[in-house]
Image: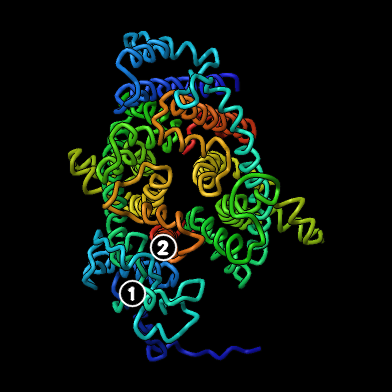
Amino acid sequence: MTVENRELADELFEPAQEQQSAKSISRPAMTYWQDAWKRFLKNKAAFAGLMLIALIILLAVFGPYANNHGYDEQNLARANLPPKVPILEQVGWLGFDGVDNRGIDRYEASGVTDYYWFGTDNLGRDLWTRVWHGTRISLYIAFLAAAIDLLIGVAYGGISAYYGGRVDNVMQRLIEILVGIPNLIVVILLILVLKPGIMSITLAMVITGWVGMARIVRGQILKLKEQEFILASKTLGAKDKRMIWKHLIPNALGPIIITTMFTIPTAIFTEAFLSFIGLGLQPPVSSLGTLINEGYKLLGIYPHMLAFSSIVISVIMISFNLLGDGLQDALDPKMRK
Amino acid sequence: MKQYILSRLGYTLVTFFVIATFTFFLMQTLPGSPFNDERLSDVQKERMMERYGLDKPVPLQYVTYIGNIFKGDFGVSFQYDGRAVVDIIGERIGASVVLGLQSLVVGSIVGILLGIIAAYKHNTPIDYGAMILSVIGLSVPSFVFAGLLQYWIGVRLQWLPVAFWEGFEFSILPTISLSVFVVATLARFMRSEMLDVLGQDYIVTAKAKGLTNFNVIFKHSIRNAAIPIMTILGPMTVSLLTGTLVIEKIFSIPGLGEQFVKSIITNDFPMIMGVTLFYSILFIGVVLLIDIMYGIVDPRIRVAGGNRS
């Protein structure tokens, strides 16, 4: 095999094409939150949960004003009416035609011409207004309890983890004892003493409720403290305040949000549970719990009294759980299964 | 190991003391008196107070109270005219235990099976269906399920009794209502644990050896997936306890939960205190047991000083 002796002329060479794609970033950089939002939108169930929650909050705020019946307006002449809705009343099997379960049109029988969308209760109060009014109170209690849990939990967990050492030791021993006490018992005992009311129910739930949040925040901050960016920040002379508010809390925000999302349905459940054992809000104030409790008394004859409040509480609980699950996947992709 | 158990025991005792003290002092500040009966004269009321030891100074009452608890004496009920609280608890606990155990057993079997099937059929309609069911089961409160069952199966179809406690068929509806939560929790938990285990190398090895699916799942996966279930047993006990309070009231079951609700309505302090303490002891006992068991099964926990996070 002979190799031609060729001169390596300069023309044979040309500069390599610069690879554009590898050097420049073709899409805008995404922050953690944009990324999380994108992941969240992909989760249809969680998004549906978010929409349902928005809808229920809107109904809770504006629902009671949708007709002109007050939530505590009693009128025995129109008691125990089944639900009746214009247009939907044409479709018999939906149960919105004002006919009770024995086949009598109660509206005709008692000579009522108004429409009661969710029917009325045994004192003739409009259930549509009462259900949304109750939802408002239940949500209010739940959000308030979750917010206070958040404040105390983040502060306690943050301080405990950030300062560490003896402070952490003492604070953790206290938590260890509190965790052992069943929430339920403390809540029941406190309400017995404080008398049921919006504030006392919220307070009773908060007293033991913050412990979970504190533990999660502590765990997060302990993990973050070990990381290099904290060391760098410390080396550059950052003060405690800046460390906590600019570095530690923002980085622990994901788990904090997720925990809060699961606190809200728990609080709604606890409030309803208290109504059941006779420690709920006192009439005429109603919450979803008291409405369900009242609904049970006439379940066999007038099931509509139980139906609507049960559906609303179930939808709220399901939506918050779906939202919480979705947020967990979106904010903490490592945990994804 | 010994040190670990001792430290858990120590915490349990302190927790118990805190609860007992808390219960006692809260009850001291409780408004209303059990003897607010108009038919009673002042002298009669005084005699009653004396009889139940309510006239003594508070610290003395406290010492007597704590001492009595250790002797297993939780005081006497006001509402049942001087009957020992412990006796009433003993009388009422039967129905609650039957209901709770039935729900736990039924719920565990169904839940674990559902979780295994969902994990095995990962990302198929069966998996999605099981997970939708478990979200519903986790979210919808037991009293809503109880209402649905009572109305449709009890009142409309009349297949099963609506309430009371007179035989096995009376316990079916309450058991279902109470076990829904157990099924949902376990199905979810078991599914994610199984998915974890199924991805492990030793499962791939087992499959590569040519083992049948049945053997891989039942001999190699389930055992390893089931260990962490112990961590949710604590919260599960609480939810069953909470559940029995509500479900027993709805279905008029003469259990301890129903009695507790009745005591709250009638201001029967010693009864409330007694049942509260009883529930607390049950709860912290279960937690202690789980901690110790977990420490035995998983040595890493012992080293970390038993910090379940």
Contact (Cβ within 8 Å) of mark 2 with mark 1 = no
As drawn, is B47 to the left or to the right of B69?
left
Number of residue marks? 2
User: Given the image, on which type of amino acid does mark 1 rest?
Assistant: Lys
**Residue A132 in view in this figure:** no
The residue that appears at 81% across and 61% down in the rendered structure is: B212
Quarter occupied by residue B156: bottom right
The residue that appears at 61% across and 29% down in the rendered structure is: B91
Query: What residue does disc 1 label?
Result: A23
Nearest to the eye among marks 2 and 1: give it.
2
Residue B74 is situated, as x and y percent measured from the top left of the image, at 50, 19
Query: What residue does disc 2 label?
Result: A305
User: Given the image, on which type of amino acid does mark 2 rest?
Assistant: Met
> In terms of secondary structure, where does tag 1 sit?
helix
Disc ID at residue A232: none
Q: Nearer the viewer, residue B173 or B6?
A: B173
Q: Nearer the viewer, residue B6 or A211?
A: A211
Residue A331 is situated, as x and y percent measured from the top left of the image, at 38, 59
Residue A305 is situated, as x and y percent measured from the top left of the image, at 41, 63
